Image (cartoon, rainbow, N blue to C red):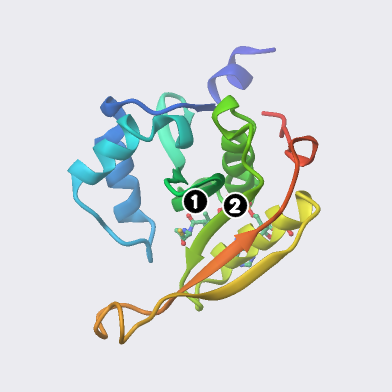
Amino acid sequence: MDAETITNRIILRHPTADDGMDVHRLIRQCKPLDENSIYCNLLHCSHFAETTVVATKNGKIIAFATGYLLPERKDTLFIWQIAVNETARGQNLAKRLLHSILLRPVCEDVSYLESSVMPGNKASLAVFKSVAKELGTGCEESVMFEEDKHFKGRHETEVLLRIGPFSSPKRKEYGT
Ligand SMILES: CC(C)(COP(=O)(O)OP(=O)(O)OC[C@H]1O[C@@H](n2cnc3c(N)ncnc32)[C@H](O)[C@@H]1OP(=O)(O)O)[C@@H](O)C(=O)NCCC(=O)NCCS
């Protein structure tokens, strides 16, 4: 492998607290993601590192997916946010991030993947539908948090996507 290939390689790894600020910056660049506090992103990069992944290229974070196992249903991985820097989109990176978390030992007993999307976010919906297809299973939609009832009109309704059930062999390893 030549030096240029090595330098441009995308590496997927667990985050550490040292990544919190870079994740926070990337979220600000990736509309329409909700911006949360830096503290919140630090928690995700530390307490939830086992179910969170960052992608780096030449040492810089270019994408991430944050998630957690539902406290009451450990068979379900909930993806909180996923973002890919504009320059790296359209190369299956979002899907790679999701599969890479599913392939980790912590997800051994996971057979459902959930996330929520705003109805207008076509890209986000397309990513999850495509992952459902690759996992050989369906993707059910239902209302998770309502604009008026839960957000008091300050945020669009969030639609819950529930993908599954699926089994380990369906999880896909993408090459670098
Ligand atoms: C959504 C996002 C993460 C997708 O990242 P990506 O790396 O470009 O996605 P992928 O290349 O893995 O694409 C996966 C699938 O989604 C489809 N897709 C991706 N972007 C799309 C778009 N803008 N419109 C329609 N389909 C799209 C791809 O065609 C692909 O489908 P396929 O597998 O059937 O060929 C990226 O656009 C982003 O960061 N957006 C801003 C933040 C955001 O909205 N995050 C999601 C909400 S939590």
| Residue 139, x across and y down, in percent | 68, 65
Q: Residue at (75%, 42%) from the top-left corner?
A: 167
Q: Is residue 27 visible?
A: yes
Q: Secondary structure at mark 1?
A: strand
What residue is disc 1 on? 78
- Residue type indicated by callout 1: Phe
Farthest residue, direction front = 72
User: Distance between the Cα atoms at labels 2 and 1?
Assistant: 6 Å
- Does 3 sit above or below residue 86? above
| Residue 73, x across and y down, in percent | 51, 49
- Residue type indicated by callout 2: Leu
Q: Residue at (31%, 84%) from the top-left corner?
A: 149
| Rendered-image quadrant of the C terminus | top right
What residue is disc 2 on? 113
| Marks 2 & 1, CB-CB < 8 Å contact | yes
Q: Quadrant of residue 15?
A: top left
- Does 31 sit above or below residue 26? below
Looking at this view, is 117 or 50 the one in front? 50
Q: How many marks?
A: 2
